[in-house]
């Protein structure tokens, strides 16, 4: 039992060191942005440093113990702590990925179980676009061929939607822009809009309360996952896209350019003239304003 009593503190010290190093790697490599907003980076770094300090302090005490016998209960608890810390550090560095639609489905299925159904943004509206668009249904379907969209814009000031007739949604301002458009969509009906988001199929978008209803005239939904605290509270926000070309695969990232249309009172629809597959932005999440 003496061998076990000596090895358990060593294992606990090493596990704390591994967990601290994992947290530092998570923050310094930028991988933390897949799970939490950028404001949490300093907290993650501080946690990693504290765990490394605890590991060093525990290591310094290994050779200074005067106890001839260690209580078995204490040994078992120390071993449990060591195993938990090692498991946590392994989960931090293991490569894994959850698709945006899977994350959205998990979040809203949990809410739907408590709230019943989760209708789309335009639930209850008549779905007639004539009240909010100046074109006929036949003219609303784009016929232009995809064209080069250039580099994806990555800067933004997070301000309200522009009144200049051109809307650029970036990672920095995506949430604020969507909130502004939902609140004052009629003022921007007909504006040109440009954004990057992931594709949601009509089936995946149907249960999302923050995604407009995908009708037979629409092609797919394009969205970003918004977070406030961490990935656990993520939910999709976005637009319905009308596109004459083939719909891109679900969960693929696309650069969409087109004309913003308001359906009903607050459902945001894009009459797309360009839909191009692109790389996922970094970070993929947008941060919810509070």
Image (spheres, helix red, strand yellow):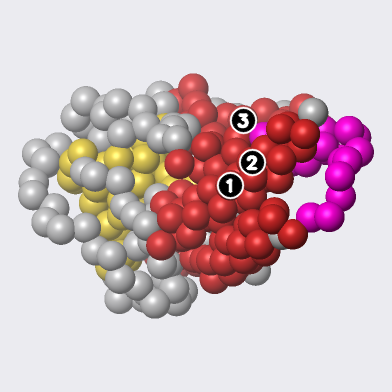
**Residue 14: image tag:** 1
Is label 3 in a helix, a strand or a loop?
Answer: helix
Tell me the magenta residue range. 65-83
Is label 1 in a helix, a strand or a loop?
Answer: helix
**182 on left or right of 277:** right
Residue 158 is situated, as x and y percent measured from the top left of the image, at: 44, 73
**Residue 124: image tag:** none
Q: Is the magenta stretch mostly helix, strand or loop?
A: helix
Q: Is residue 183 visible?
A: no
**39 on left or right of 110:** left
Q: Residue at x 55, y 43 (%)?
A: 89
Q: Nearer the viewer, residue 257 or 284?
A: 284
Q: In which quarter of the image is the N terminus?
A: top right
Quadrant in the picture for residue 242: top left
Q: In this view, does 248 lie above or below 176?
A: above
Q: Which residue is drawn at 51% across and 29% down?
A: 102
**93 on left or right of 191:** right
Q: Is residue 215 above or below residue 53?
A: above
- Magenta-drawn stretch contains 71: yes
Residue under numbered circle 2: 11
**Residue 106: image tag:** 3
Q: Residue at x 36, y 40 (%)?
A: 198
Residue 7 is situated, as x and y percent measured from the top left of the image, at: 67, 38
Q: Residue at x 84, y 55 (%)?
A: 66
Q: Which of marks 3 and 2 is in front?
A: 2
């Amino acid at each position: 039992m003496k061998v076990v009593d000596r090895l358990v503190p060593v294992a606990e010290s090493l596990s704390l060191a591994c967990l601290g190093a994992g947290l530092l790697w998570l923050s310094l490599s930028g991988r933390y942005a897949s799970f939490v907003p950028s404001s949490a980076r300093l907290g993650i770094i501080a946690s990693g440093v504290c765990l490394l300090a605890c590991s060093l302090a525990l290591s310094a005490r290994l050779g200074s113990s005067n106890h001839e016998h260690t209580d078995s209960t204490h040994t078992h608890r120390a071993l449990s702590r060591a195993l938990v810390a090692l498991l946590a550090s392994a989960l931090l560095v293991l490569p894994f990925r959850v698709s945006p639609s899977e994350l959205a489905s998990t979040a809203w299925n949990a809410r739907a179980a408590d709230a019943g159904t989760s209708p789309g943004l335009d639930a209850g509206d008549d779905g007639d676009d004539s009240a909010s668009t100046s074109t006929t249904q036949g003219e609303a379907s784009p016929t232009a061929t995809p064209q080069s969209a250039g580099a994806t814009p990555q800067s933004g000031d997070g301000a309200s939607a522009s009144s200049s007739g051109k809307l650029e949604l970036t990672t920095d301002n995506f949430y604020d822009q969507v909130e502004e458009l939902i609140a004052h969509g009629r003022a921007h009906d007909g504006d040109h809009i440009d954004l990057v988001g992931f594709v949601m199929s009509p089936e995946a978008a149907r249960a999302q309360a923050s995604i407009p209803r995908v009708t037979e005239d629409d092609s797919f939904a394009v969205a970003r996952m918004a977070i406030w605290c961490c990935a656990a509270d993520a939910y999709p926000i976005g637009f319905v896209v009308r596109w004459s070309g083939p719909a891109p695969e679900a969960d693929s990232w696309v650069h969409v350019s087109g004309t913003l249309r308001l359906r009903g009172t607050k459902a945001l629809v894009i009459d797309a003239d360009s839909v191009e597959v692109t790389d996922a932005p970094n970070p993929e999440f947008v941060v919810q304003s509070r």
